[in-house]
Image: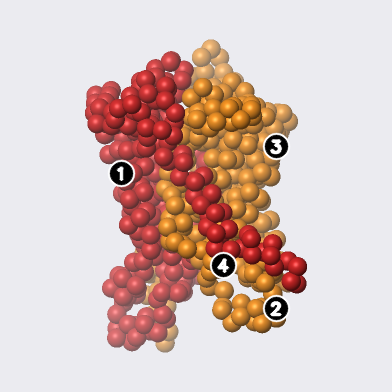
Amino acid sequence: MNTSSPRRSALLSKAGVAAMLGLATLYTLLPLTWLLLSSTKSREDLFGTNGFAPGDEIHLTENLHHLFTADDGVYLRWVVNTVAYAGVGALLAAVFSVAAGYAFDKLAFPGKERLFSLVLLGVMVPGTALAIPLYLLAAEAGLVNSFWGVFLPGLVFPFGVYLARVFSASYVPDEVLEAARMDGAGETRAFCRIAFPMLVPGFVTIFLFQFTQIWNSFFLPLVMLSDQDLYPVNLGLYVWYSSALSQGHPEDYLLAVVGSLVSVVPLIVLFLMLQRFWKSGMTAGAVK
Amino acid sequence: MASPSTRGQRRTAALLLSPFLGLFAAVTLAPLLYAAWLSLFTTRTSGLGFGGTESVFAGWDNYVRALSDPAFRDGFLVVAAYCAVYIPVMIGGALLLALLLDTGLAKARSFFQLALFLPHAVPGLIAALIWVYLYTPGLSPVVDLLDSTGIDVDFLSADNAVLSAANIAVWEWTGYNMVIFYAALQAVPRETLDAAKVDGAGAIRTALSVKVPMIRPAIALAVLFTVIGSIQLFTEPKVIYNASSAIGSTFTPNMYVQTAAFQNNDFGLAAAASLLIALFAAALSFAVTRFSRRGSAS
């Protein structure tokens, strides 16, 4: 026993733990540092100076100006689109998920568990495997290259329904509902007035999950959209990046870098602000 | 006597479920069924392939074609190789970091949690753009640094593309899963840990024999979602594909599907391949769930 203790104390000392955590942090932060530094550089410095060192001069404002005026200000349009796809989409998806999850948890109706296994099947089918089938169906419905072709799929979040059922089981006590029923409140009223307010933390969590998922999605918009004005930010940046490589436009490379920074910053701020919620949601999903 | 309330519950359940189920039917079930239907046909194209084409019933032909196409099968091998590297490194790393945070020796815990989680707030596409820059010789400070120490690696070569893609995913997901594992670890009852200490178990022994088994459900779920995510592998290799001549347009199953549909206009084949991917994902996640249940029951 004693023989192992010196070795253990070397690794498992305060300094050892701090060193290991510090190393991991360096790995996560260095690429972001690169993004931040590169966004402040001129095109010459971007290719001419070390990526982890600042450039000769700070060109951030020029780069931002360039970003928002390039291609007649199409970047701002992409940002607005993304907010619509991800913000509005995730909001509706969260409402639908919470309503469905609550119904699965608290209400009695025939075929409940069979329907719920259908939802679980939806959790298991990967989103990108659905992209081509969705495209083919949208082609039939005339929704290819339209707002709806990307927006509607974002409204469905089977994992959110699963999470909402878990949340409902732990946040909404059956006794409270019994009391409401005794007082003569209808079922719908009991959900809207009593259960939903109790489920708000779960609602925010589900919103955040679906929001990042839609904000992240790339395959679906890539196959669905051809009109630049309908692009979300991700797809737009990809197009800039691709043209920088294939047509040798180094200007576009800088645009993709600055555009990346501008679209990442609000996400990071959102995550910092809503820490409490994403943490609780991730744990609820994991621990059951 | 219970019937009015039962009726009320049924009516409300219908009301609350219909938006989700309606949309679920429209954007999940209907596309799957439509793809299943289309996958049974092949289009005989004349000329450009727009309109006026003839659709011929093909039976299982598209499935046979996909499964017997080495390019499609290789895609699954790529995903398997990717999983073999990515899952142990990412899950192991997340677990190690969570255990380190949980030792009581760690300072500034919330800082480390946030710093390690931060990459997850970066969309996959942007993460891939950043890393591809860091992989590109002549631009990358990392490659320069390695060069100056005499190490010569080409991150974008065919052999390394899988590792390079796995690294991007490790960067994005380790902190995310670390937060989950850390939260699960904090739910481990203190009495259990005290009992282990009384029995003479050291920190490492406690971690391996007490803590890790107790958060097994969280680990199993993380593995499940990682597997489902890995089968969808598309964004990272797609971005690497642009920068590297080493990897082809059918590198992963999803890239194969996209190429079949939009380069070759072979929608029957694309539909069949999509369904095979979905089926494979569902079967795998079923197996992982089954396996982890059996494990925790014993």
Badge 3: chain ID: B
Q: Nearer the viewer, mark 3 or mark 2?
A: 2
Q: Residue B77, which numbered label?
A: 3
Q: Nearer the viewer, mark 3 or mark 4?
A: 4
Q: In which quarter of the view is residue B153 placed? A: top right
Tell me the distance, in whole angstroms, between the alpha carbons under discs 4 and 1.
41 Å
Q: Return the residue at label 1.
A: A83
Mark 1 falls on what kind of element? Answer: helix
Q: Nearer the viewer, mark 2 or mark 1?
A: 2
Q: Nearer the viewer, residue A52 or B29?
A: A52
- Residue A10: where, in percent of width, then height? 64, 60
Q: Nearer the viewer, mark 4 or mark 1?
A: 4
Mark 3 falls on what kind of element? Answer: helix
- Amino acid at the residue labelled 3: Leu
- Amino acid at the residue labelled 1: Val
Q: At 70% across and 78% down in the image, what residue appears?
A: B200
Tell me the distance, in whole angstroms, between the alpha carbons under discs 3 and 2.
46 Å
Q: Nearer the viewer, residue B294 or A37?
A: A37
- Residue B2: where, in percent of width, then height? 43, 84
